[in-house]
Amino acid sequence: MARVTTFTVPGTPGANAWKMPATLRDVWDIIYSKCAGPLADHDVDHAYIERVASMPGQGVASTFKFGKNAGMLEAFLIAANIPYTLVTPSKWCGFLGLRRQKDETNVAWKNRHKAMAQQLFPALDITHAVADALLIAHFGLEWGGRRGTVLGIDPGQSGGIAVVAGKGE
């Protein structure tokens, strides 16, 4: 598992973030051992997963694999008894003020995501791989009105998994 870092600062939410593992077994190990099992580091109340879809230009095999992996993430959450909500990128990005600007390059847009994640979680060394997962978890706390601990998942191969403790924790 590629653990990024852990922090807890009094008065602010704590967070863990992991780059999306290469194997489904490693994804399950993070969800179960860190977020749901009897010895888990966190007691996750809810998960937010970015709703994904195929995109023009993607190959059939890669689209199938992407869809299979996204479905497995949902199955893992069900198996771990963690309720979840699927959220579209337009919903969570719009809520956080991260809509893509006209003529903005993908790199510039993703750099804004990373900068916001770094501002929200200054004790973490934010990478592009975990920025969206952290922002999705933050969205879940703010939009969902949750006070507990939430999981944010960016299911892409270059995505990540993040767990963020709410202010009530």
Image (tube, grey):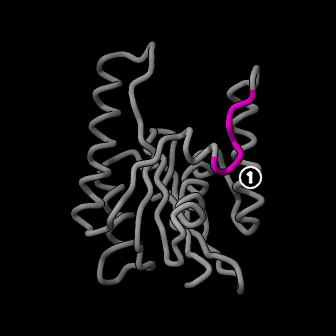
**88 magenta-colored:** no
Q: Which residue lies at the image location 41% right of the left edge and 67% below the top edge?
A: 46
Q: Which residue lies at the image location 61% right of the left edge and 67% below the top edge?
A: 5
- Tell me where residue 30 sits by quadrant: bottom left
Q: Is residue 77 above or below residue 11?
A: above
Classify mark 1: residues with Cα within 10 Å, few (<14), some (14-19) or many (20+): many
The picture places residue 125, in percent across and down from the top left corner, at: 70, 59
Which region shows up in magenta? Answer: 95-101
- Tell me where residue 11 sits by quadrant: bottom right
**Residue linked to disc 1:** 116
Q: Main secondary structure of the magenta part?
A: loop
Mark 1: which secondary structure? helix
Q: Which residue lies at the image location 29% right of the left edge and 83% below the top edge?
A: 38
On screen, residue 55 versus residue 125, left or right, reads left
On screen, residue 1 versus residue 14, left or right, reads left
Amino acid marked by disc 1: Met
Residue 125 or 164: which is nearer the viewer? 164
The picture places residue 6, in percent across and down from the top left corner, at: 60, 72
Q: Is residue 41 above or below residue 152?
A: below
Residue 105 or 21: which is nearer the viewer? 105
On screen, residue 53 versus residue 98, left or right, reads left
